[in-house]
Image: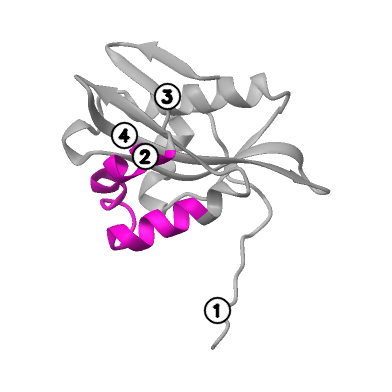
Amino acid sequence: MTEHRCSGLEIRRLSPPEWMHAYPVIAQLRSLEEPEFLARIRLQSYAGYELVAAFHDKQIIGVMGMRPVHTLARGAHLHIDDLVVDATGRGSGVGRSLMEYAEADARARGMNAIFLDARPDAIPFYERENYVLHAAPSMNKVLAP
């Protein structure tokens, strides 16, 4: 899936030279300096991570990071790592449009599920989009250097 247009939005994957233009919106979600953001995106892209942006009047107003994943437990699925809408555009349907893009993309890849990690304050948004809390708890351990 390359491009999706709805309600005055253009939604499409960003090419590597465009990644820097997503930084001001991503910075509203992630505390990263721009050089670190670009380095991480480049590294993640080797494993299939892609940045998708929602444009309004040629300005990026929403960004989503997604990647295809294949696991024994879940099979082939799309994982959304990052989803953020510029503070001035929240509640306008941009997030919903990005999720619709992800769902169409997953279907086009032959996947039947999307997984994501949600911040507590974003859970109501995902529930309105018919996502449910997954029964498996997510755990991590930070390793000291």
Identified at 22% across, 22% down, the residue is: 58
Q: Which residue is mark 1?
A: 142
Q: Amino acid at mark 3?
A: Arg
Q: Residues within 10 Å of mark 4 (few under 14, many from 20)?
A: many
Q: Which residue is mark 4?
A: 62
Q: Which residue is mark 3?
A: 12
Q: Where 145 sits versus 95, above or below?
A: below
Q: Position of residue 94 (x, y in %)?
A: 32, 26
Secondary structure type for disc 1: loop
**For discs 4 and 2, the disc positioned in front in the rendered view:** 2
Q: Earlier in the sequence, mark 2 or mark 1?
A: 2
**For discs 4 and 3, the disc positioned in front in the rendered view:** 3
Q: Residues within 10 Å of mark 3 (few under 14, many from 20)?
A: some
Q: Amino acid at mark 1?
A: Val
Q: Earlier in the sequence, mark 3 or mark 1?
A: 3
Q: Earlier in the sequence, mark 1 or mark 4?
A: 4
Q: Earlier in the sequence, mark 4 or mark 3?
A: 3
Q: Which residue is mark 2?
A: 17
Q: Position of residue 143 (x, y in %)?
A: 58, 83
Residues under labels 2 and 1: Cα distance?
32 Å
**Front-most of 136 and 54?**
54
